[in-house]
Amino acid sequence: MTVVDSLAALASGSYALTESYLYTAEAFGDYLAHVNADGTLAVGRWYREPPTEMLNTADLAIGALRRLGTLDPQAHIMVLRHSDFGLLLARPRAFGATEVAAIRSFAQRNGFEIVFDPLGRTGSFADALATRNNVPATDDRPFFFANSGEKAVPVAYVILFIALAPALALSYGLLLMPLRRVSGPALRSALGRRTTLQAVMVGLGFIAAEIVLLQRLTLYLGQPALALALGLAALLIGAAAGSAAVARARLGVAGAALGCVLVLVLALLALDHVAAATLSWTLPARALLACIASMAIGLPLGSVFPTVIASAGSQDEHLVSWAWAVNGAASVLGSIIAVGAALFIGFTAVGIAAAACYLVVALGSVPGVERLLRLRMAPAQS
């Protein structure tokens, strides 16, 4: 595996939020499982000081070897360096004196420096590797490049903060503040509070579920552009169909929201198993299955917001435009928040959070909650 990214782009942080399934714990486990006993996996990466990226790569190999039953995984890896280029060698069988001597001879002839020798294990790289005990990236958190630089604060977090600040300011200034002045009295009622809460939760839940779905499809189809095009189109078609069907089904807000909770939980439990069972299918067959799954998930997701709008608009028409604005702002901010959360807790947890958002929507329609909101407003009204 030779580097496939630009050093200049990597240094600038352009890949900080890029999902790379080539460099995950599961991927390295697959690589080494396909190497025979005398074979060697060679992974080339850029080498910068401090060598965080090469240390992350070595950690992935060590973790994979350990899961394969290797007792001393560091005896199975070597790391070489040539200027800004690093090379990790990993193999199922430990490096012996003969192999190490041959690599040392190669390094001397071709201008390479051996930064990690499994027989010596001395030097700054070996010291840094000995103090690490982490998994740099997994299929659930595939952000290998998020913390591969020398900065104290990972560039990925800086990018998200920079994106969140203007998104928050523009959403409030252009959407919420103008409508708040017009709809002020309605927003202070129990109905206004409930509608605001539900619109926010639907916006956050929908975008979080969408991002998790596209992440799963990217891994399943292996082509990010295809996964985005097919997954997003099918999800929105399903959501449109769900929006049209909910009027005839006459589901309430609670019923539609609980349907989303059920579908999202089932999807999180089933998608990985279905993907593993059908991964050997041809790309067109997998693409068709991806479209069907996306539409099935979109059906309940598209049914909730129309019921929220209908419920609010039947009692106060001023809340319709407010709910649209709040939902739109929550979707924009939620896309940034979801990626930030995935960096810390992974996409599966983000999917669980999406289901929790719809559960809050359902609970907001429970009569007891509505009465509580009215009681809170009673002192102000008196």
Image (cartoon, rainbow, N blue to C red):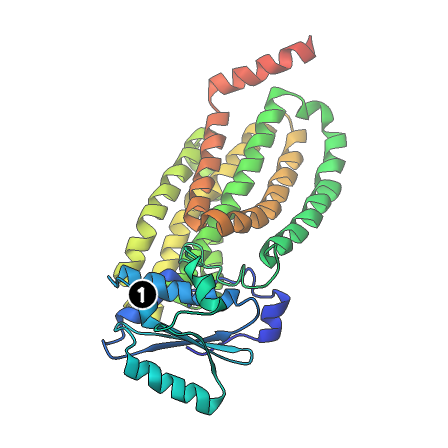
Place of residue 87 in the rendered image (x, y in percent of width and height, measured from the top left) = 44, 77
Task: Please determine whether, in this image, residue 140 is positioned above or below residue 43.
Answer: above
Q: Amino acid at mark 1?
A: Pro
Q: How many marks?
A: 1
Viewer-closest of 250 and 329: 329
Query: Residue at image x 25%, y 60%?
Result: 277
Query: Residue at image x 28%, y 62%?
Result: 278
Place of residue 75 in the rendered image (x, y in percent of width and height, measured from the top left) = 32, 69
- Badge 1 density bin: few <14, some 14–19, many ≥20, Cα 10 Å: many
- Dot 1: element: helix
Quarter of the image for the N terminus: give it: bottom left
Query: Residue at image x 34%, y 84%?
Result: 101
Q: Badge 1 is on which residue?
A: 73
Is residue 148 in view?
Answer: yes
Left or right: 252 with respect to 151? Answer: left
Q: Residue furthest top?
A: 382
Query: In which quarter of the view is residue 326 placed?
Result: top right
Is residue 288 in view?
Answer: no
Q: Residue furthest bottom?
A: 109
Left or right: 274 with respect to 52? Answer: left
Place of residue 150 in the rendered image (x, y in percent of width and height, measured from the top left) = 59, 63
